[in-house]
């Protein structure tokens, strides 16, 4: 998979295909859609300072996103303060 310069990689891991709702590949416009169910959320963390990880009872979503990038994207306030303290 070619990595786009400045882009962010992602992965979705589901415990079983039962939690996969839809995968759509379009030849016409080159779009890809992946939908599923993570289930009840169990946790949110930043792994090794470079990977946002959302864990659900049915699977895990990972997004290559540095802590500093996440802070810039979030509105100022309680969530940003939690990041400063390392709670995410």
Image (cartoon, helix red, strand yellow):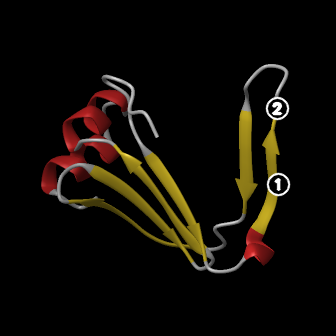
**Pointers 1 and 2 in contact (CB under 8 A)?**
no
**In the image: residue 48, left or right of residue 8:** left
Using the image, determine if residue 29 lies above or below residue 54. above
How far across and how far down the image is residue 43, in percent?
Answer: 42, 70
Residue marked by disc 1: 22
Image point 14% across, 55% down: which residue?
Answer: 85
Displayed quadrant of residue 41: bottom right
Give the quarter of the figure containing the C terminus: bottom left
- The residue nearer to you, when weighing 22 against 25, is 25
Element under disc 1: strand
Displayed quadrant of residue 40: bottom right
How far across and how far down the image is residue 16, in percent?
Answer: 69, 80
For marks 1 and 2, give the CA distance: 13 Å
**In the image: residue 31, left or right of residue 64:** right
How far across and how far down the image is residue 76, in percent?
Answer: 31, 31
- The residue nearer to you, when weighing 41 against 22, is 22
Image point 74% across, 41% down: which residue?
Answer: 33
Using the image, determine if residue 39 lies above or below residue 30. below
Report the number of numbered marks. Answer: 2
Residue marked by disc 2: 26
How far across and how far down the image is residue 38, in percent?
Answer: 64, 67
């Amino acid at each position: 998979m070619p990595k786009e310069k400045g882009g962010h990689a992602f992965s979705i891991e589901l415990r079983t295909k039962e939690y996969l709702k839809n995968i759509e590949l379009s030849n016409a416009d080159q779009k890809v859609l992946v939908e599923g169910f993570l289930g009840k959320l169990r946790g949110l963390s930043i792994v090794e300072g470079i990977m946002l990880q959302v864990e659900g009872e049915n699977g895990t979503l990972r997004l290559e996103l540095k802590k500093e990038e996440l802070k810039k994207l979030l509105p100022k306030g309680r969530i940003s303060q939690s990041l400063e303290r390392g709670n995410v």
